[in-house]
Image (tube, rainbow, N blue to C red):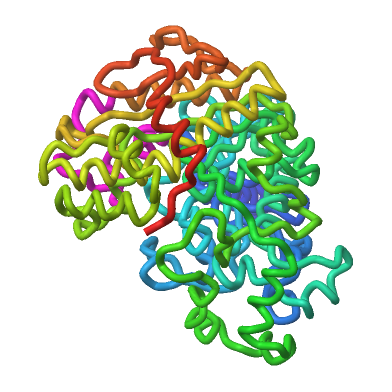
Amino acid sequence: MTPTFRAALALGVCLAGAAAFAAEGPVVRTTAGAVRGTGGDVLAFKGIPYAAPPVGAGRWRAPAPPARWTGVRDASRFGNDCVQSPWIVSSGQPVSEDCLTVNVWTPSLTPAARRPVLVFLYGGAFIGGTGAYALYDGTRLAAGGAVVVSFNYRVGILGFLAHPGLSAESPTHSSGNYGLLDQLAALRWVQANIGAFGGDPARVTVFGESAGAASIALLLTSPRAQGLFAGAILQSPVLEPLAGLAAAETAGRRLEPDLARLRRWSAEELLKHNLDFFPAPARALTEPAFPRPILDGHVLARQPREAYAAGAVLPVPAIVGCNVDEGRMFSPPTLAPDAAAFARYARERYGAAADELGRLYPVAGDAAAHAAATRLIGDALFNEACRAIARGLVRATPRVYAYLFSRDLGSSGVPATHAEELAHVFGNLTAPDFNPHPPLDAKDAALSEAMRGAWLRFAAGGDPNGGTLPAWPRYGADDPYLEFGASITAGRAFRREALDFLERHPIEVP
């Protein structure tokens, strides 16, 4: 072998290696080590640890920084889903306590691009959820010019157990809000790392649905979240009263007084008690429920309704909205199947105010009873909370926008219920996690494009107006909103009289 041939062979091997490396996927260096994602018009990086696995002695402790690694870590697949009841999980991912990972979709890795960032918090009633649902895939949102992030946080008994032993060992003398602490840790990871993915850490907008939106509503009242995001979008939040630390510790101690023994329980054993913290199926909104966030004195120190009523929230631009028939998802057919049942339901829960309720939610015959009940449940749990949050936010910042999602999916004639806006926001109208009947149509595709554009413009500059949208008014005394339905139109004072009633008479949850 001549020196010339040997040099040419070496050069060929080198070039082939470089080509293979490029073909394997893009590489980004994070604060803990390098990760390799997958390429395309939008680049994806999945399953990146943002915290150390909360296992063993780390169970029921605040998240710790992830261990550094050498080499290039594969980031082509989602990480494990956090432990939750089997009926909650449907993503197909393995379930483990080792689950604190983040996912990133970006149209460009150029740091100078400094694109706006959208960070999604999933719902699941604080007892379930995952960033791996196909419905939450960030590709289409990122294609519009943003960096999109999702992550997993602890849920259920592993995310929200309080216990006197846990509070005693904590440097903050608190326990219980581990799922919220995970959220804060993930947002700190975004601040430290998103620039390497082409994002702008100064333009991070959190958006979430259901328990994810409720989490954002709570974080907006917490000084611990100061500086971690510049905007917030709350899709169908609730605003329930929270248990105090002492009450939550009592519930944990009833489960097992000995913390060391409790830590030795397997995740499967713990899941058997995941719902033991809940009171009876019918409970008043003034009763705390577990497992979910509490007033721990560290992350959260004030009842959320009190904070919003006083405007004691982070002064960041916000969008807040709900769906027109939120309650349909939570209303079984046995709930008020006829007019007599609805009347009994009203008397049992509202007593002397039942007649006024009947006027606000009229039932013209048996066939209308169930629809009235679902409208009542949705208004009480979600729509009144949306209004309370918007009214509180506007006390802190003038840049607040409200929406109502009313699209009857696939022109079905059935009004939109809880979570049905998600496919439109993400642009994933054919996601396998989301199978409406009838299938979505061209009107849904146009509505999705309009909503994605609004969310992206808001992330870019704190104002969703532009594109083909009619003028979206800022929130004010007349409760203005933009309705995303068969058409997009501005409205005011959505069900004001009914929501005023429900504000005075918190409903019980069936």
Q: Residue 16: in sight, yes or no?
A: no
Residue at figure coordinates x 41%, y 64% from the top left: 282
Residue at the limit of the structure toward the front, as seen here: 352
Residue 309 spot, x, y in % from top left: 67, 33
Instruction: Pick whichever, 276 or 224, lies toward us.
Output: 276
Q: How many marks?
A: 0
Q: Which residues are magenta?
A: 420-445
- Nearer to the camera, 447 or 316: 316
On the image, which quarter does residue 100 sit in?
bottom right
Q: Is residue 248 above or below residue 369?
A: below
Magenta segment: does it hold 429? Answer: yes
Tell me: 114 left or right of 23: right
Q: Residue at x 24, y 21 (%)?
A: 486
Q: Who's the residue at 72% across and 90% down the image? A: 258
Q: Looking at the picture, how far across and down is residue 182, in whole percent?
A: 68, 57
Query: Which residue is at the front of the view, 132 or 264?
Result: 264
Q: Is residue 340 left or right of residue 381?
A: left
Vertically, is 288 above or below 315?
below
User: Which residue is painted at 55% across and 29% down in the image?
Assistant: 146
> Residue 176 placed where, x, y %?
69, 66
Taking 189 as reference, is 438 left or right?
left
In front: 9, or 464? 464
Q: Extreme right residue here?
A: 171
Q: Quadrant of the N terminus?
A: bottom right
